[in-house]
Image (cartoon, rainbow, N blue to C red):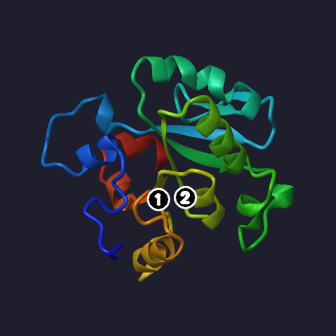
Amino acid sequence: MNNYSLHSGYNTPLLRYWQSASCTLTGDNLIYPIFISSNDDSKDDIPGLPNQVLLGLNNLVEHLRPLVEKQLKCVLIFGVVDDSVKDDRGSAADYGKSPVIGALKLLRAQLPSLILACDVVDVFVFLGAHIIAPSDMSEGRILAIKQLLHKNGFSRQVSVMSYAAKFASSFYGPFR
């Protein structure tokens, strides 16, 4: 097997479509943000983000299933953890009870057609993230991520999404 890949990390039709020259805006172009709480039973409105809910794992599939049935294709997962488990290294994202880790496992099992995007934490790739979206964008960050994906055999299964695509979108407004 050679070291070159025709599709790189664009291993699904949706990811390849996003790379096309098409300018038609459809639901396939949109990514739905979901906010996952470390409280498994959470289902709370998020002030400042209309129609968005902070969800616990026990409410996640119930919330997303009707949207997937209406052709939702991709979600961007944001984990929300208690301040008590936060540290300077962000290690709460990589521990076993991380809300993102729980969401990845649950969504891969219950809604397998859904494309899953999340921030960069190595374990997210191993748990089934389709897209890594690094939010810090330090110099050389993308190269380092792509090299790590290639080294671990994920260069054909995981895409890297620049946050520039998010910042340039008028849909990003509520996050500013």
Q: Which mark is residue 121?
A: none
Question: Residue 157 location, x and y as percent?
Answer: 44, 57
Which three-letter amino acid code belongs to the residue tagged 2? Asp
Image check: 9 left or right of 16?
right
Q: CA distance from mark 2 to mark 1?
A: 5 Å
**Could you say where residue 69 lies in the image, as x and y percent from the top left?**
46, 17
- In screen coordinates, is 63 left or right of 96? left
Q: Residues within 10 Å of mark 2 (few under 14, many from 20)?
A: many
How many tags in the picture? 2
In the figure, 148 relative to 21: above or below? below
Tell me if mark 1 has few (under 14), some (14-19) or many (20+) residues whose alpha carbon lies within 10 angstroms of its own: many
In what element is the residue under mark 2?
Answer: loop
Q: Earlier in the sequence, mark 2 or mark 1?
A: 2
Occupied quadrant, residue 55? top right
Are dots 2 and 1 in contact, CB under 8 Å? yes
Image point 37% across, 52% down: which residue? 166
Identify the amino acid type marked 1. Answer: Ala
| Residue highlighted by disc 1 | 133
**Which quadrant holds the N terminus?**
bottom left
Q: Residue 116: image x %, image y %?
A: 51, 44
Decide which of 81, 147 is in the foreground and name it: 147
Quadrant in the rendering for residue 7: bottom left
Closest to the observer: 149 or 135?
149
Q: Residue at x 79, y 60 (%)?
A: 95
Q: Secondary structure at mark 1?
A: loop
Residue found at the far right of this picture = 84
Residue at 48%, 51% (x, y): give it.
130
Q: Which mark is residue 119?
A: 2
